[in-house]
Every structure is written in C-alpha cells, then in structure tokens.
Image: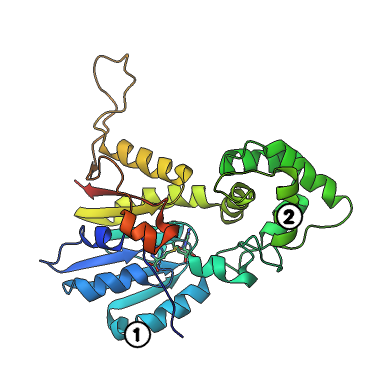
Amino acid sequence: MKYNHFSVLEEEVLSYVDDTKPSIVLDATLGLGGHTLSILNNKKSVSNVYCIDQDKNSILIAKERLEKYSEKIKFINDNFKNVNSHIHEKVDYIIADLGVSTYQIMNMDRGFSFNSQNRLDMRMDRSQVLDAYQVVNSYSVNRLSEILRDYGEEKNHYKIANQICRYRERKDIFSCKELSDLVSASSPGGGRLNSSTRTFMALRIEVNNELECLKEFLNKSIEILNSGGKLIIISFHSLEDRIVKNFMKHCEKNCVCETTKLICDCKKKSTLKILTKKPIRPSQKEILVNPNSRSAKLRVGAII
Ligand SMILES: C[S@@+](CC[C@H](N)C(=O)[O-])C[C@H]1O[C@@H](n2cnc3c(N)ncnc32)[C@H](O)[C@@H]1O
C-alpha cells in the first residue's frame, strides 16, 4: 500500500547528520519511517538504525517502506522510555519526532479523531489497558478538569469536565464524535481551532502518559549518546517543547547552585551544548505542503 507521507522538518533534521564518518542512529519515534528513510537515502555512512515505536501497526507499515534497508535496521516495539533495555551500545544520533502521527489520527478506529464514530481510544500502544473511554467515563470531575487545564491549557476546563460528568449520569460517552459534540455544545470556541482540540489533546496526553515518558526518555537518551553525538527533538505543543528546552538548558549548565551561594559545590558538569539557540520552525513552503507541520519546533543539542 502507498502512503502519502510527509516527515516534518526533514531537510533540517538531515542537516544535523554528518555523512563523513560511520554512525549509528536511534529513531525513537519511527512512525511510518519517514525520517529513517530520508536518513538512509541521503547519508550513506549511517551503518545502523535502531527504530522504536510503541505502535505495532506503524512498525509493520514502516518495515515495508524500509525493506531495502532491512539489514541496517533493528525494529523495537516498545515505549521509548525503556530505551536502555534494548540498546546496549552508544549511538551517534537520537531523533524523536514526538506525539501521534497523521496515520494514527486519520485511522478512524484508533479513536483519536473528532469525527470518529468509534470508541474513544487514543492509545498509541494498543496493548495498554487505559484508553480514553475509561478516562472520560470514570475519572472524577476534579481530575478531568485538572487534565483539561494542565494538558490542554483549556480555559473552560471545569465547565467541560462538569458537562462530561452530567452526561455520564444518563449514559457512557462512547465515541469521539459524541464527546466532540458535547464539548462544542459546552464550549463553542471560535478562532481557527476546533472547540474540541484542547480537550482531545489533553486526553491523549493523559492516556499515553506522554509528558512523563518524554522526561524519562530524555534522561536516558543522554547516557546512550557518544561524545559529540546529537539529540534531535521535534515537538508539537508548548508542554512538550518546554520539557525539551528545560532539559537541554539543565544539561548545558555547569552549576546548579542557588544564586545566593558564593562558592559552587554542586559538582554539576555541563553534558550538552545547545546547537539551536532558538527552535527551528518549518518554512512557509513546508507549512503550505503539510499544514500539520505548522506547530513543529526542532531543538538540537550535542554531547560534550
Ligand atoms: C509524529 S510520529 C513520527 C513520524 C516519523 N518521524 C515519520 O517521519 O514517519 C510519532 C510516532 O511516535 C510514536 N510514539 C510517540 N510516543 C512514543 C513513545 N513514548 N514510545 C514509543 N513510540 C512513541 C507514535 O506511536 C508515532 O508512531
């Protein structure tokens, strides 16, 4: 099967991969394999690529797309937070293109999309027990409200959570469409975002525990990169980007003592040099071809 597939910031990612000496790459978010394919097509010195995805279906499709490079690739179906249980050597590049893929969103039975009549699901890893149906139909009003506020930055968080709980008194909320209609009725929104966008994003982050997994992964990633190796991260919303930015800044610092201390005793050493003082954004040309890229931010750091 052919997939109309765009990898976000493809050229920009490639520009950070050196082609003059042999290297090992870890693609921590394989998806349909777009970034791995472009690296293997363009950087002949890359000898091996470890490819992780927690979504079995995406791996199956990517395997087909990457067939001609099968000898160079090891596929790993797991959460990237477990990276160190699979990779026992140092690598030169780690690429993570965070979040869900268009393939996952467009696939109605995955229960990510507003219009899906299927069960609210939103699991990237379909072997996981918790799904969006359970979150929506069993969490307390206060917990739902917190999730919408903290993960969706939704200003009507309590009103929406309250409407969800009132609706639930009559019947469970089954489908994405049912939830989306309910959210639109309680919070009509306006502007260029669909009124359910923030609610759906918040639920997806909760279901997949995205922010905690990202923090765990970043900490482990530093340990498996070679000296001079690069950490290349693309994020799509401010919560993710803040975690990546703060992580890189912390790694770059030589001292984390309180400012009131006259003599440093923290023994902190800088482990990373930030190569992108400001995040790199997609060009207007890329946004025109692939509007989904518009919120992407790329940050890169090199191990010292
Ligand atoms: C934006 S897509 C990547 C697209 C890919 N770079 C390409 O060009 O085809 C993100 C992928 O990362 C996977 N993913 C997200 N969080 C993950 C995690 N914590 N562990 C493993 N895979 C994850 C998703 O299942 C999804 O397939």
Q: Position of residue 244 (x, y in %)?
A: 38, 44
Name the residue rendered at 73%, 63% in the picture.
175
Q: Is residue 181 left or right of residue 151?
A: right
In the image, residue 93 above or below residue 38: above
Task: Return the residue nearer the eye: 8 or 35.
Answer: 8
Q: Mark 1: is the Cβ under 8 angstroms from ligand 1? A: no
Count of number-bearing discs: 2
Image check: 99 left or right of 218? Answer: right
Q: Secondary structure at mark 2?
A: helix
Q: Is mark 2 within 8 Å of ligand 1?
A: no
Mark 1 Cα shell of 10 Å, populated few (<14), some (14-19), many (≥20)? few
Q: How far across and down, in percent of the image, does residue 185 sit?
A: 75, 47
Q: CA distance from mark 1 to mark 2?
A: 42 Å
Q: Residue furthest right?
A: 170
**Residue type pointed to by label 2:** Asp
Q: Nearer the viewer, residue 211 or 258?
A: 211
* Disc ID at residue 181: 2
The three-letter amino acid code for the residue at tag 1 is Glu
Relative image position of residue 55 (x, y in whole percent)? 51, 69
Of the two numbered discs 1 and 2 on the same chain, state the one appearing first in sequence. Answer: 1
Occupied quadrant, residue 119: bottom right
The quadrant in which residue 180 appears is bottom right
Q: Position of residue 186 (x, y in %)?
A: 75, 44
Ligand number 1: quarter of image = bottom left
Q: Are marks 1 and 2 in contact (CB under 8 Å)?
A: no
For this view, does 134 lie left or right of residue 102?
right
Picture disc at residue 176: none
Viewer-side label of 1, 2:
2
Q: Residue at x 27, y 65 (%)?
A: 25
In this view of the protein, can residue 54 be seen by the observer?
A: no
Which residue bears the numbered disc 1?
Answer: 67
